[in-house]
Amino acid sequence: MVEKFSAPKGVSEYFPPRGRDFETAIEKLLEPVRSAGYQLIELPIFEDTELFTRGVGGSTDVVTKEMYTFQDRAGRSLTLRPEGTAGVARSVIEHGLERGQLPIKVFYKGPFFRAERPQAGRYRQFFQVGIEAIGADDPALDAEVIYIAHRALQNLGLKNFTLKISSLGDGESRSKHRIELMKFISHIDLDQESLDRVAKNPLRLFDDKRKEIIAAMESAPLIRDFLSPDSQENYESVKSHLRNLGIAYEEDPRMVRGLDYYTGTTFEFLHHGLGAQSAIGGGGRYDGLLQALGGSQLSGIGFGLGIDRALLALDAEGITLEQERSGLDLYLIPLSPASKITSVALLAKLRESGLRVDMSYGDRGLKGAMKSADKQGAKFTLVLGDDELSSESVHVKNMASGEVVSVKLSASEISSFIKKMI
Ligand code: HAM
């Protein structure tokens, strides 16, 4: 027997009927994004490894443990993108997008890759819808980005989620905090690996899952007490915009995002029906990223929403996505070789007229074909045999009522009849 293949461990995949939900979810998440003027940016799935080590940061699990890195045939080190922001920043710099209208407003959707330990809601290939707004340092823009993420989740129908926000402040705030935090951490007994991480980014220790570290960090100095007057004012302004927009938030001064590029406003959306992997989205401002990647001093802010988790959240809330139009309008059932030839041409014309139409392939006979029509949610069926061909008239059956109506065998007559009925 030939050995069967399985998908690589821990990847998410979507096939019918779930594939439809996946597609609909993306469209719904993107509606508020598009209505705020963001445009598609389509970027490579792999980039230079260095882009992520420098962009995402050497203290993160994403870079140190989770990258899918490989050498191409010329010996260059490439990495499957673990997130979208670094690639957007690279593209903005490479193509000089800042010479156009500022802020640059782009969105993306697609797969991302992190070699994490797979579990429910945590995959090695997963999907995000994300946006980035680059080139304007304005608290109103921070509020816009958070508002769009919030609207996107609401537009999907989700209710049981909350928003957490924090501010990491400007450079001055962070360096003052860092000095005090390092002093505090020097009293904690740490292994070499943790010490190395802390040296790169001491905030990582707030995210440590070990009980003794959690306990030790209980009284650690928090960034909110070190915000410079400017940063404080900026943060207050973001919060006041959010209140004006009617968006409820909780402040979480201990929130640490999993990527190193953040500065200023950071946020996460948590869903309460998902267990351990509760973050359905997150983002924040990154004021040093473009410069760190060789670009000019442009600030940016954005978010990534996890599509896989959003779908699980819909399940948890018992929400079925409303499909705009589900199922087929019409199903053709040819019963003879001659009617098959007519059906193929008729099918094409009916589809071009805007109807959703399929036909029974494989010469399966009337009973099997009717079953297929039913399974595909066809609203009408049309049986075509030699008699219908010679009389040039067909019977169209309404699958819900069972009513049968005789219609002239012409694509335009059949199409207008079906359109009138649906
Ligand atoms: P992130 O928080 O790493 O941010 O990812 C955003 C969202 O992607 C998470 O909240 C989660 O829903 C989903 N996600 C992440 N990892 C996985 C996984 N292994 N399996 C399933 N879902 C996952 C970023 O990626 C930033 N680039 C967001 C951003 C844009 N910040 C500024 N601009």
Image (cartoon, rainbow, N blue to C red):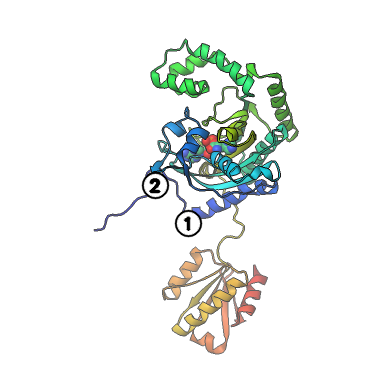
Across and down, in percent, residue 388 comes to 53, 85
**Horizontal arrangement in the rendering, residue 259 relative to residue 140 (left or right):** left
Instruction: Kindly identify the residue that appears in the image at 65 percent across and 19 percent down.
Output: 227
Across and down, in percent, residue 249 comes to 66, 30
Q: Earlier in the sequence, mark 2 or mark 1?
A: 1
Q: Secondary structure at mark 2?
A: loop
Task: Determine the image quadrant of residue 366.
Answer: bottom left
Q: Amino acid at mark 1?
A: Pro
Task: Report the residue marked by disc 1.
Answer: 16
Instruction: Kindly identify the residue that appears in the image at 69 percent across and 47 percent down.
Output: 37
Across and down, in percent, residue 8 comes to 37, 46
Across and down, in percent, residue 86 comes to 54, 39
- Position above or below: 40 against 114: below
- Position above or below: 55 against 201: below
Nearer-the-camera pick, 400 or 106: 106
Q: Secondary structure at mark 1?
A: loop
Q: Amino acid at mark 2?
A: Asp
Task: Kindly report which numbered mark, 2 or 1, lies closer to the viewer in this rendering.
Answer: 2
Alpha carbon separation for disc pair 2 and 1: 34 Å
Residue at the farthest right position: 244
Q: Does any portion of residue 268 appear in the rendered image?
A: no
Task: Report the residue marked by disc 2.
Answer: 72
Q: Quadrant of the C terminus?
A: bottom right
